[in-house]
Amino acid sequence: MIPNTLTIAGVDPSGGAGILADIKAMSALGAYGTAVVAALTAQNTLGVAGISAVPAEFVTSQIDTLFSDVRIDAVKIGMLGQQSVTRAVAERLAHWKPRHVVLDPVMIAKSGDALLERSAIDELRESLLPQSSMVTPNLPEAGVLLDSRPADNLKEMRRMAERLRRLLPDDGQRWVFLKGGHLPGNDTIDIVHDGDQMLELPGTRIHTRNTHGTGCTLSAALAALLPQCADVPEAAQRAKAYLVEAIARSGDLEVGFGHGPVHHFHALWGNTNRL
């Protein structure tokens, strides 16, 4: 059965991040993607020029209308922007109870622009984290969630993963996917932890500017793969492998002058040097 997946996130017109990137990743990995627009941005590969809020009531309407008709097997949550929207999403997910909820706590764009109100951070921590089956912060985002500085080595990452896991319900079905891309050096080790198992996913840094939307792409890949895989570690390994290849093949694309997007359809398009 082909899974139906949902992304609740913002719109990036350049297509490298947000719901457009999520739909590409979900589609590339064999899932049918749906989307609820939680925020609007004016941005490109160089930065964010503006953000426009979507009324929380309309976000609620989008979610309820979709769930009342479509079986949703997994949800990915990305940029929410406002506290009121964060609360609305939490309330509706508590009502509909999807099996898989992947929370990517999007706070800052690749360009450094803020994407989440500070007042929304507590709301996210208190109302969305408890409903998440997996949370996928990078190191700066993990630091914000834990009110601490980001980890800067693997030993500190392990401790941070344990602390993050304690923010989730203790029912044996919740996972932390802590992304190590901000570590110094060429190793990009990610940690996947459920309170018992702690798995390290090794990697080597790919030296490219085309890293716009990597976090969105990984969390969307996880949402697509969790319903299709035997267990969470398999989904995590496959999602990381997909993202690594998407970054490695990003040079096939020519999109913008800043941080370009990854190549979501690297396995499907073949040689794209056609112009």
Image: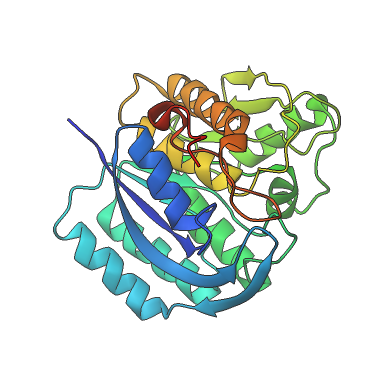
Q: Is residue 167 visible?
A: no
Q: Position of residue 259 (x, y in %)?
A: 69, 50
Location of the N terminus (image quadrant): top left
Q: Quadrant of residue 167?
A: top right
Q: Position of residue 254 (x, y in %)?
A: 59, 46
Q: Quadrant of residue 265?
A: top left
Q: Is residue 86 above or below residue 164?
A: below
The residue at 44%/35% (across/down) is 222
Q: Is residue 157 left or right of residue 102?
A: right
Among all residues in the image, which is located at the extreme front? 275
The residue at 41%/32% (across/down) is 269
The residue at 72%/43% (across/down) is 209
- Residue sitting nearer the eye, 267 or 237: 267
Q: Position of residue 71 (x, y in %)?
A: 18, 48
Q: Is residue 203 above or below residue 48?
A: above
The residue at 29%/50% (across/down) is 97
Q: Is residue 145 above or below residue 178?
A: below
| Colour pattern of the rendering | rainbow
- Residue sitting nearer the eye, 92 or 213: 213
Q: Is residue 215 visible?
A: yes
